[in-house]
Amino acid sequence: MAGGINKLTDTAVKAKREPGYYGDGGGLWLQVSRLGGKSWVFRFTRNGRTREMGLGAFISVSLKRARDKAADCRRILDEGGDPIEVRKAERRALELERARSKTFRECAELLLNKKAGKLKNPKHKAQWRSTLETYAYPLLGDKPVSSITADDVRQVLEPIWKTKHETARRVRSRIKNVFDHAKGVHLFQGDNPAAWTGGLEHQLDEVKADRRNQPALPHPQVGEFMAELRKRDGMAAKALEFAILCASRSGEVRGATWDEIDLKARLWVIPAHRMKSRKPERGPHRVPLSDAAVKLLEGLQRVKGSPYVFPAAKGGMLSDMSLSAVTRRMHADRLKAGKAGWVDRSSGDPVVPHGFRSTFRDWCAERGYDRDMAEIALAHVVGNAVERAYLRTDMMQRRANLMQDWANYCANLAKPSNVVAISEAVGQ
């Protein structure tokens, strides 16, 4: 057997120039390519199939090292294994070990880069990054993802779980997404430490959602409120007025861009991706504009370089607190003047911008307007899945009349009668 191996010498190997294979014995071969390159190959037969396995280039693997590698391959064969499959498994294990050293921050950045092309709303992109930077990175950022446990995630969430529950809920969801993505690209194995069911649900107290209605102004007072609102300068006041006239959400108004507005058609078309929980298949939400809404828009001065209808001072989007600040100041000014503040009739709390959607809805109900039409005006889902499959209209013309009636009502300072006129209640 000794004469069957170690046939080559270092001098002979260096001297080989002709392309071909030169055997050293025991399955080890020196391969010389047509271009003069030299490499080591191990040939073996397993299950009736002859295979070749590269052992490295001669320039980096010496004859002695090549023989050692060939000996390892023969040992694997003697034990019933496949040298090629064993090496693949070793490489996978090495790659996984390297991957396991990836930090949470590195994995999060990979996900953020992927989401950058999917999240069309700049605000959503900023929220994703800011919540991770503010709450997750300080404790998890520099830890290898493989070492992070559910207890680590709990420590991130616990300080804000009750005081800022909605924020905490979003942070947990985003941390979970980071681990889901890391697992999908083979940077993490095992159960997701941010999973709620069967995981964090046993470590964090249940927090009941606050189901209280948003403080809303009784609709008989809306005319007086609008009169005072229109005396105020500032883009936030204009945005609030427009939101009330259109019965729209604050975020939809603050994010409105001029390319969504068609003044000639008296129409505002809000893309589906900017609507709360609106699925793409439902399409955009069309808002008919009343005379007052059109007049308000025509009176606005466009800010160069800004796409927003109601931009902030530097051209960006108004903050989510800007409209709320207007209602708070108006309430405070009423109290200073010795008048009753702008408050919700039931709770006694000062009104908030979102509450005016309830004001509009109450007015629709008391004036006898069609329920589905009012719900569509608020961009709510109408009916069950079967009903929605058959209800293809968004009642655009009727809603145009509805929004004009609402705008007229908002401009009326006289105390409305409790009696509904027949002409208003019939045919609406």
Image: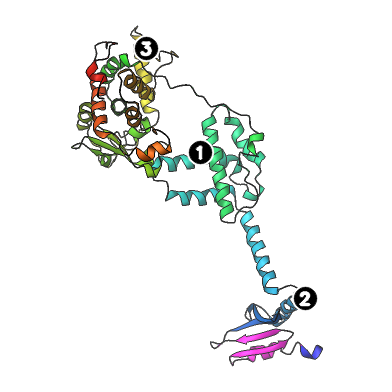
Q: Residue at x 33, y 8 (%)?
A: 337
Q: Where does the image place residue 58, in percent across and percent down from the top left?
A: 64, 81
Q: Amino acid at mark 3?
A: Gly
Residue nearer the viewer, 88 or 313: 88
Q: CA distance from mark 1 to mark 2?
A: 54 Å
Q: CA distance from mark 1 to mark 3?
A: 35 Å
In this view of the protein, can residue 379 be seen by the observer? yes
Q: Where does the image place residue 322, in percent across and percent down from the top left?
A: 37, 28
Q: Residue at x 35, y 23 (%)?
A: 361
Q: Where does the image place residue 343, in percent across and percent down from the top left?
A: 39, 14
Q: Which residue is mark 3?
A: 341
Which quadrant of the figure contains the N terminus?
A: bottom right
Residue nearer the viewer, 281 or 139: 281
Q: Are marks 1 and 3 in contact (CB under 8 Å)?
A: no
Magenta-drawn segment: 5-34
Which quadrant of the figure contains the C terminus?
A: top left
Q: Which residue is mark 1?
A: 131
Label placed on residue 271? none
Crowd class of label 2 (few under 14; some 14 to 19; many from 20; radius 10 Å):
few
Q: Upstream in the sequence, badge 1 or badge 3?
A: 1
Which residue extends farthest top? 338
Residue 387 is one of the magenta-drawn residues: no
Q: CA distance from mark 3 to mark 2?
A: 88 Å
Q: Amino acid at mark 2?
A: Arg
